[in-house]
Amino acid sequence: MEPFELTAARLAQELRARRISSHELVEHLFARMERLDPYLHSFLCRTRPLALQLADEADQRLAAGAASGPLEGVPVALKDNISVAGFPATCGSRILEPYRPVFDAHVVERLKEHRLPILGKTNMDEFAMGSSTENSAFGPVANPWDLSRVPGGSSGGSAAAVAARLTPLALGSDTGGSIRQPASFCGIVGLKPTYGAVSRYGLVAFASSLDQIGPLARTVEDCALLYSVLAGKDPRDSTSVGASVPDLGRSLDRPIKGLKVGIVREMVGEGIGPETREAIRRAARVLEELGAIVGEATLPHMHHAIPTYYIIACAEASSNLARYDGVRYGRRAAGGDLISVFEKTRAEGFGPEVKRRIMLGTFVLSSGYHDAYYSRAQKVRTLIKRDFQKALEEHDLLIGATSPTPAFRRGERCDDPLQMYAADVCTVSVNLAGGPGLVVPCGLSPDRLPIGLQILGRPFDEERMLNLGHAFQQATNHHLEVPSLASPEGEPEGVWGAK
């Protein structure tokens, strides 16, 4: 098998056995990127010098038998809202195009400490605001399964790169489903950890009470291994929690017999497409065959989640994005007085979706409307959180759809923001509640587009969630399906691996 075909866990074994070097692996993936990424546009920046430096360090330690981490030498890509010292962090926005961070995010420190070569920064919806990665100021990302369709958002570049085997691992951020929905659309695994489980230090903020960094990979095992590298307390992030991280590599294979799993009625009911609904039902039957006790669960306030999320997220975005004023860093428009510079910088630097959300957020925080909108949304957020608490008292885990439909076509929803926002109906409530969520492939639509099963657990119970997802993958072959990079004009000649 070619190196790009191997999972991260398998690559780690090959590296330890010295059957391949990390340096060779990085060069192999850069060559593959050169050939395939023009079709996808999943990367905004390649960090070749850093990748090779970390690869060489890993090779030296592996040769000396001194490797300390489970993924030493295995490459990873990062969403472009995660700071890497000396390299761009554009957040998919013109306003940050000239910005170069002078520090590493906490997760980048952890990756460097464990010597995972960082291949580059992936494309994303501007400031993580979007569900399709069509809002990037630098152009959209294509879905490897069908180049005419979106890869999901806002971590679409990371998801597409993993699905196309340009990288075995990637990091994304999830504010309302931005790891899980792209994972579903691209047929890979995505983990949104519990809020506070992974430090947000060095993550450019969208909505601070909702944002969370997490891994994307091809298997649950790979996701678990990368999560174990990232998780842990960071004193620079006041919301970071020092919960102990179990040895996830060993706990994945525990039997799931007797686990109580609830199918969330609202995630397989009205508004969920028939092919998605059927795929979730089939997945539930597989879990039953494995010994899980499957019943029905309900999140009665879930139908309020979309308006609640967009009020709170936009309010926080309005506050967080006020710092981009053309004075301190990033883009600065030419102008006369300070106010005109401020106005022109923001008018030229922000795209239409970011402007829309800033205006909405400013409105709901304004005098006379704060109580009617923002305060009320926070109260509904509490009700949503209580729904999860009650459902997870009755069940060990919850399952449901990730998105109402498989990946939609590029441009299909750009002129209808409400239809675009509706794509998040199954994901945003998890962020409002602060809990963890995992997505694993569970089937293909009649058009051969991936469908993702969403698994939800109690706060800081990633271990049990990953255990269920791994058991499902061991019993099925959905994660082994490979996209063909087919386009409406036919498969681009010679772009898909060795045949």
Image (cartoon, rainbow, N blue to C red):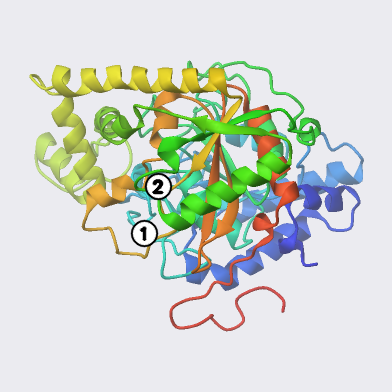
Depth order, front residue of 164/461: 461
Name the mark on residue 138: 1
Residue at 80% from the left image edge and 51% from the top image edge = 10
- Three-letter code, disc 1: Phe
Residue at image position (67%, 41%) is 287
x, y percentage for residue 104?
A: 55, 34
- Asked if residue 236 lies left or right of residue 409, the reply is right
Q: Position of residue 400 (x, y in %)?
A: 50, 40
Q: Which mark is residue 90?
A: 2
Q: Position of residue 29 (x, y in %)?
A: 67, 62
Q: Residue at x 48, y 69 (%)?
A: 146
- Ranked by sequence position, the earlier of labels 1 and 2 is 2
Q: In which quarter of the view is residue 453 placed?
A: top right
- Position of residue 463 relative to residue 409, above or below, is above
- Quadrant hosting residue 248: top right
Whether pointer 1 and pointer 2 mark residues with C-beta atoms closer than 8 Å, the reply is yes
| Residue 351 seen in render | no
Question: In the image, is residue 230 above or below residue 268?
Answer: above
- Asked if residue 344 lies left or right of residue 183, the reply is left
Q: Tag on residue 492?
A: none
125 relative to 221 in the view: left or right? left
Residue located 68% across and 36% down the image: 468
Q: Secondary structure at mark 1?
A: loop
Q: CA distance from mark 1 to mark 2?
A: 10 Å
Q: Amino acid at mark 2?
A: Thr
Which quarter of the rendered picture does the C terminus lie within? Answer: bottom right
Q: Where residue 168 appears, x then y in whole percent?
A: 67, 53
Tag 2's secondary structure? Answer: loop
User: Crowding near pointer 2: few (<14 within 10 Å), some, many (20+)?
Assistant: many
